[in-house]
Image (cartoon, rainbow, N blue to C red):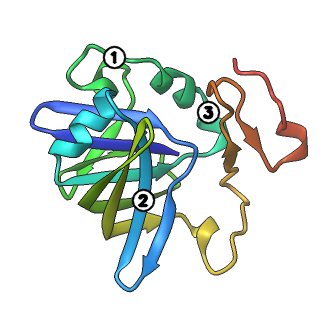
Amino acid sequence: MILTSRYGEEVAAMPANSCMPISDDPPLLAVSVRRGSKTNRVLKRSKTFSVNWIGFSDRKLITLLSESSKFPDKLKALKIPYQEIMSTPVISMAQAYAICERKSVQEAGDHDLTIGGLVGSMASIDFDENWKFEDYRPILYLGSNFRDPYTTIPDMRRAPLK
């Protein structure tokens, strides 16, 4: 998945191994971001962030976004299409997304754990009732260096990035 946030003209985005639902009532999500990163700095100043689930076919985004960027708008600089929804960048090819309002930030070792309240979401038909995964092929694990994402589809496992 890809975590995005905006503060003023700065748009930050990074691959994330996971987000964690931490409450149903109210609906809350938590994400962990390395302290000192641009994404963490933007996330701490912004009021909102989005978590974007992309499919295995878009795995090149993981590699692109794993590199740091000196550009104010990382997504625009990398020519990754996105839209603004509720003043929050959302990756255009996302199969699902959650928009959260930042509630708190807790230190957790060399990372900060950001907790957000869900304020908007969208999911493709593949997420209806039981996850069908007919069109959406999830990336299940990014690996420690984001270069070798895994999927649930046997013929796509360990497929080389092109």
| Residue at (70% x, 48% y) in the render | 140
Answer above or below: position of 27 versus 53.
below
Question: What residue does disc 1 label?
Answer: 69
Farthest residue, direction bottom: 25
Q: Which mark is residue 138?
A: none
| Residue at (72% x, 27% y) in the render | 148
Q: Nearer the viewer, residue 111 or 6?
A: 111
Asked if residue 140 lies left or right of residue 52, the reply is right
Question: What residue does disc 2 label?
Answer: 30
Q: The residue tagged with tag 3: helix, strand or loop? A: loop
Q: Which mark is residue 59?
A: 3
Q: CA distance from mark 2 to mark 3?
A: 23 Å
Q: The residue tagged with tag 2: helix, strand or loop? A: strand
Q: CA distance from mark 3 to mark 1?
A: 19 Å
Q: Nearer the viewer, residue 86 or 67?
A: 67
Asked if residue 82 lies left or right of residue 22, the reply is left
| Residue at (42% x, 59% y) in the render | 30
